[in-house]
Image (cartoon, rainbow, N blue to C red):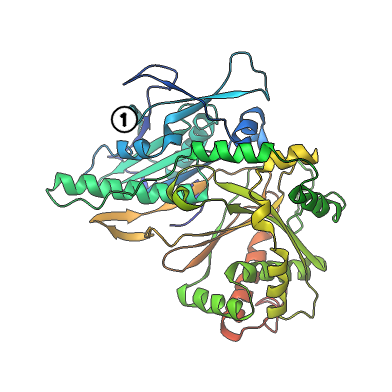
Amino acid sequence: MKFTDIPSLGLSRAVSPSGGLTLRRCPTPPGQPTNGGRLTCRKRTSHTHSMRPVRVPCHRPGWAAPSICPPNSMRTPSPPRGWTNRHEALRSQLTLSPRSTPGGRLQRMTLPAGALSIHPSAARDFTDGRKLARYLEELFDSETGPLGWPGYLCATISRPEAITACLAADHTLTDGYSVLLTAYEIHTLYAAALAAANGKPAPPPHPPTASYLDFAEAERTAADALTAAHESIVHWRQFLTEAGGRLPEFPVPGSDVSGSPAAQPGGYTELVDASTAHAFDRVCRAAGGASFSGLLACLAKVGHEITGSGEFRTMAPFHTRTGPSRSSIGWYVGMGPIAFPLSATDSFAEAVRSAVSGLDGVKDLVQIPTPRVEELLGRPLRDPFMFRTVTFVAPPVPATGTLGGLSSSAAAAPTRTTCTSGSCVTTTASSSTTVTLRPARQASRSPHHMASIKHLLASIASTARWPATAHPTGDYCP
């Protein structure tokens, strides 16, 4: 599994004169009775869902789309009904109540398990992979909004040797772990269907999972009880005050200073292989940290060489999943501020320990949804520089290979938003670590930034110290 963007999915290989694109939608919204009728959900929405429909963040929608390859023998590979039955969030819809105004109360409608199915709704042939990628991106932008039904859309691309399925969902419906879980669950559900068709034993069923709607209700209740004097809000205010009220910015200067939004180009780079990733983690743990604090130390080192700043500052999302919610699809994400000092003479071990100190208390801060933090601070917290990691080792979703006799190839493509710069480091079951970098206006210089980090990681994994030269060319950035 890798995170990349749609143009990088290699859809040109998925286009064939004898195949084409088929769209698969849910025909019945919760507001219309079907198979037992609709239900008005009394659970309140999360702060994130309440704010998303009334904003226009960064002028583009936000969605994420896992891409998988079911077997070609399954000629109509709609997502299996077991997937929507399993997750209540996939059977619900947010709507503005009749007397509400922008920013007003939302109501949620939901369907009972078994009442929802996904059917083919349109087909079109493509022979140009770039045109197909553009079409899918525009389609996902237009049909996966927070108030749309169902908030997600499946597209399948057929060719003689295989089928590629892309399932895009509004980002408040699916966080990063949900994207990976979706790929895994649909793989295993396809494997069960294939086994049944061939008269073979089916894989064991998925264990029960929690409903995101229950989590959202509990999260909102806890967040609504907070005041501006709460210690977490005080911490946020201090984080902003220390930087003159400014949020962290991407350390690489950009050539475009117009300030106008632009779609973020993406990139996918393998930072280290499996053995180097393990070696890097061992060095970090010997220094008193872990891979995450070690990565922060490397980002701080590169940033210091570029800007000369003696402090590293960023914002990072953390998952808020516990217990049964670990296998639930939803938005289990909180944002936390990170800041720690770094001097030119600090060793790597000292930088790791400094990063660990900078992470102290962050897990408590991320329990408060960002929109509620904004309300209590009285200012927006759109994150211009964000660093995130996704470590996904169980259940094992292979990047390529087989799962229950099912050929597999998986990737995930997030939308190209226009506000956030940053990087996403993904560690998979095979321990290979990769990064997707998506700065809005620093694209031309970003490869040098990543090359510097890659150089640091390799040196630290082999020597447990910073390299003698900052970059293979001797410089961090041109």
Residue 71 visible here:
no
**Is residue 286 placed above or below 417 in the rendered structure?**
below
Q: Position of residue 155 (x, y in %)?
A: 39, 37
Q: Residue at x 71, y 48 (%)?
A: 383
**Left or right of residue 187, residue 265 in this image:** right
Q: Is residue 269 left or right of residue 367?
A: left
**Residue 16 occupies which quadrant of the picture?**
top left
151 and 249: which is toward the camera: 151
* Residue matched to label 1: 114
Q: In the rendered image, which quarter contains the C terminus?
A: bottom right
Q: Position of residue 99 (x, y in %)?
A: 63, 13
Q: Residue at x 46, y 69 (%)?
A: 431
* Callout 1 secondary element: loop
- Farthest right residue in view: 244
Amino acid type, label 1: Gly
Question: Is residue 314 shown above or below 245?
Answer: below
In this rendered view, identify the residue nearer to me: 289 or 392: 289
Q: Is residue 424 left or right of residue 469?
A: left
Q: Residues within 10 Å of mark 1 (few under 14, many from 20)?
A: some
